[in-house]
Structures are given as C-alpha cells and as structure tokens.
C-alpha cells in the first residue's frame, strides 16, 4: 500500500480536478515545435521568440480548460510564468530534449542548471521526467537510465514533490524506421512497453504518477477485446495512478487510445500535439494559429475532458492506496521536512 507525504499529496491534488481526474496540457515540447519553425525559416536554430510565442499562445488559450499545465524551463516558463492562472496545477519538465544517441541506446540527462529542488522552490506542483527506455537496449545504457530515474525519484522524495514519470520506447540504431523524432515508434512491440512499465513500477524509482504511451500503435486502438487486454495489463503493471500521452497521434486516434486507457483505469491524460498540432500547422500565420487554438483545439480539449469525466478513474481512489484512498503516511517524521535543503 502507498501512503503519501504532505507535499506529494498536495501536488497530486493540485494537478487534478475536484473529482480526481487529470486533464493536463503539455506545453513542454521542444523539437516538435523548434524543428518545423527552423525548417520554415531556413535556419539551423528556431528563434527563441518564435518558439516562446507559440507556447505563450498555448498557455493563453488552453489553461482555462486544463487542470494543470506542463511547462519547460527554456521557453514556456520565462515567457508565460506571469500569465499562469494561480489555481491551476504547474508541472515542470526536467529532462533535456537533447539526448545522447549511442550504439547501445539513448541516454537521458537533466536540463543544465535545473533540478528537483529548483522546481520545488519556484512553486512547481510536480516534476516531470521523460526517459527513453528499451528493455533490449545495451545493459550499460539501461543501467544508466535506471540510475538516472532512481536519482530523480530520490530527489523528489527529499523535496517532497510528486514525481510524474514518462516512458517512451524508441527505435534502436539497427531498427527499421530509425528516427530521432519525438513520435510514436513505428512497429513498436507491446512487450517493450509493458516490460518498461513493469521495471519502473518498482518502489526503488519513487514514481508517483506514470505518463504512458499506448502499448499498441495508436492506429491499432480499435476497441477490440485483444487491444483492451493489453491496456488492462499495462494498468495492472503500473500499480499507481497513470495518465495517457498522445505521442503525436491524431485527434481520432488519440481519442480511441483514451477510450481503452480509461477502461483500464487511467486517471486522465497529459497530452500536447493531439490537442494543438493542427493549429500549429498554420505557422507562420499567427492569427490562424490563435483561431485554431481557440476553435478546434479547445473543442477537442472539451471533448476528451468529457470522455475523462465519464470514464476515467479518480486517482485518489486507486487500489494502491488501500480501502481508504490516498492519505498521508502515519509517520510523523515525514512532516518534519528539512527546508534548509530546499
């Protein structure tokens, strides 16, 4: 049974609505926004102002319809921090979008000069970290990834803040369709997703909420009993509250994924491109982008939020917390945080 310390319980509540459902919007993407802007402008690096401006529009148009916003320290936080609605949850991404590609797999790292402690000090309600993981990557790479995640979990426990952990399988160098893009891996194997969840559900990593990809290709989320069984197994292995990510899936495909996920016990979603990519495709027409966000993006957000209201599971009532639901640990020592360390 899992019990929660005061900071973790407060953060978990702040990210959800009054019914314990997570309807969170991801604004932390970097390559999926920087890449198209740079390509259109014919430059190597997208101008900071252009990337940040789009993220600002996302915050402006979508935060009222979200329970929490996921922001990155490079663009979204410096541009939009002052415009955030105070009663909305704030999740801050910690991993750098630049990863090290090796012959044995990918290695993750945190953003320079950022840490769990810094996110806590700035008022973040949770720390989000994405780790690339393939069970069949090299032993050296997998151990490094495990060590990285474990350290984040320990830091989140130290600073008493929820750890929201995102897992993505990816193509190894020898795989067909090899790409470094932040998109769903073509031909991914459900076993790779399930084994990854099983590994990081171990208590050593200190994960409070999983942000998970579909265990099957989004296009294959067809409502069948066979696909549902895979989602059910992923939820069982997670063993704690979990939400779905969109991984670049289209609106219809992601809604189908959510239908499976909610039936399997997911507590909501933390999605980005499925919500706002269609609007972003109008770049550099900022008026069209803004209209698309206020129109189709908001409509889609309302649609999947209604689906979550009807079918998602209250995170605080997850079986991992026992019959009484999410509650504080009985150990009084956990209340005596050492704020000199923060």
Image (cartoon, rainbow, N blue to C red):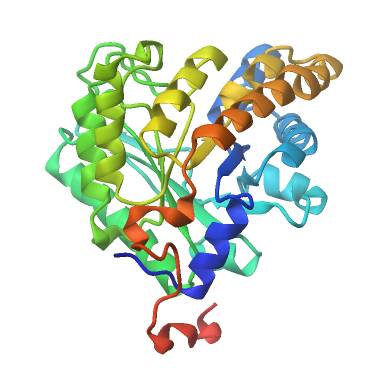
Looking at the figure, which quarter contains the N terminus?
bottom left
| Relative to 15, 279 lies left or right | right
Residue at (48, 84) in percent of width and height:
335
Residue at (51, 39) in percent of width and height:
268
| Relative to 234, 325 lies left or right | right
Residue at (56, 62) in percent of width and height:
11
- Based on the displayed image, in which of its 4 quarters is residue 298 positioned? top right
Q: Is residue 339 above or below residue 127?
A: below
Looking at the figure, which quarter contains the C terminus?
bottom right
Q: Nearer the viewer, residue 78 or 149?
A: 149
| Relative to 272, 220 lies left or right | left
Q: Is residue 302 above or below residue 24?
A: above
Q: Is residue 37 above or below residue 62?
A: above
Residue at (59, 52) in percent of width and height:
15
Q: Nearer the viewer, residue 212 or 299?
A: 299
| Relative to 206, 13 lies left or right | right
- Based on the displayed image, in which of its 4 quarters is residue 193 positioned? top left
Q: Nearer the viewer, residue 32 or 319?
A: 319
Mark yes or no: residue 114 visible. Answer: no
Query: For the image shown, how many numbered marks are present on the structure?
Result: 0
In the displayed orientation, state which residue is furthest to the right.
Answer: 287
Measuring from the top left, give residue 48's x and y in whole percent.
71, 35
Mark yes or no: residue 62 visible. Answer: yes
Measuring from the top left, give residue 125's x and y in whole percent.
59, 60
Measuring from the top left, give residue 261's x and y in whole percent.
40, 31
Measuring from the top left, give residue 69's x and y in whole percent.
64, 45
């Amino acid at each position: 049974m899992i019990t929660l310390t005061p900071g973790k319980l407060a953060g978990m509540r702040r990210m959800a609505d009054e019914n314990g459902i997570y309807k969170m919007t991801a604004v932390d993407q970097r390559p999926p926004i920087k890449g198209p802007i740079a390509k259109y402008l014919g430059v190597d690096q997208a101008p900071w102002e252009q990337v940040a401006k789009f993220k600002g529009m996302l915050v402006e148009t979508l935060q009222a319809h979200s329970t929490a916003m996921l922001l990155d320290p490079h663009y979204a936080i410096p541009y939009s921090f002052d415009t955030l609605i105070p009663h909305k949850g704030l999740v801050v991404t910690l991993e750098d979008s630049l990863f090290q590609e090796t012959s044995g797999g990918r290695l993750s790292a945190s953003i320079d000069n950022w840490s769990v402690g810094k996110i806590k000090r700035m008022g973040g309600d949770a720390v989000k970290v994405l780790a690339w993981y393939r069970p069949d990557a090299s032993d050296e790479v997998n151990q490094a990834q495990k060590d990285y995640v474990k350290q984040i979990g320990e830091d989140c426990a130290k600073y008493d803040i929820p750890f929201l952990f995102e897992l993505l399988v990816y193509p190894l160098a020898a795989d067909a369709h090899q790409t470094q893009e932040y998109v769903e891996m073509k031909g991914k194997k459900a076993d790779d997703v399930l084994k990854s969840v099983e590994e990081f559900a171990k208590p050593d990593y200190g994960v409070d909420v999983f942000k998970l990809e579909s265990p099957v290709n989004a296009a294959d989320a067809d409502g069948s009993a066979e696909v549902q069984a895979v989602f059910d197994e992923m939820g069982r292995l997670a063993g704690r509250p979990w939400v779905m990510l969109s991984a670049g899936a289209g609106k219809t495909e992601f809604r189908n994924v959510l239908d499976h996920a909610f039936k399997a016990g997911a507590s909501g979603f933390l999605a980005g491109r499925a919500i706002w990519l269609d609007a972003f495709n109008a770049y550099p027409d900022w008026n069209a982008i803004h209209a698309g966000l206020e129109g189709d993006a908001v409509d889609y957000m309302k649609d999947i939020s209604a689906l979550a209201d009807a079918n998602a599971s209250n995170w605080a009532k997850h079986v991992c917390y026992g019959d009484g639901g999410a509650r504080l640990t009985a150990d009084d020592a956990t209340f005596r945080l050492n704020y000199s360390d923060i």
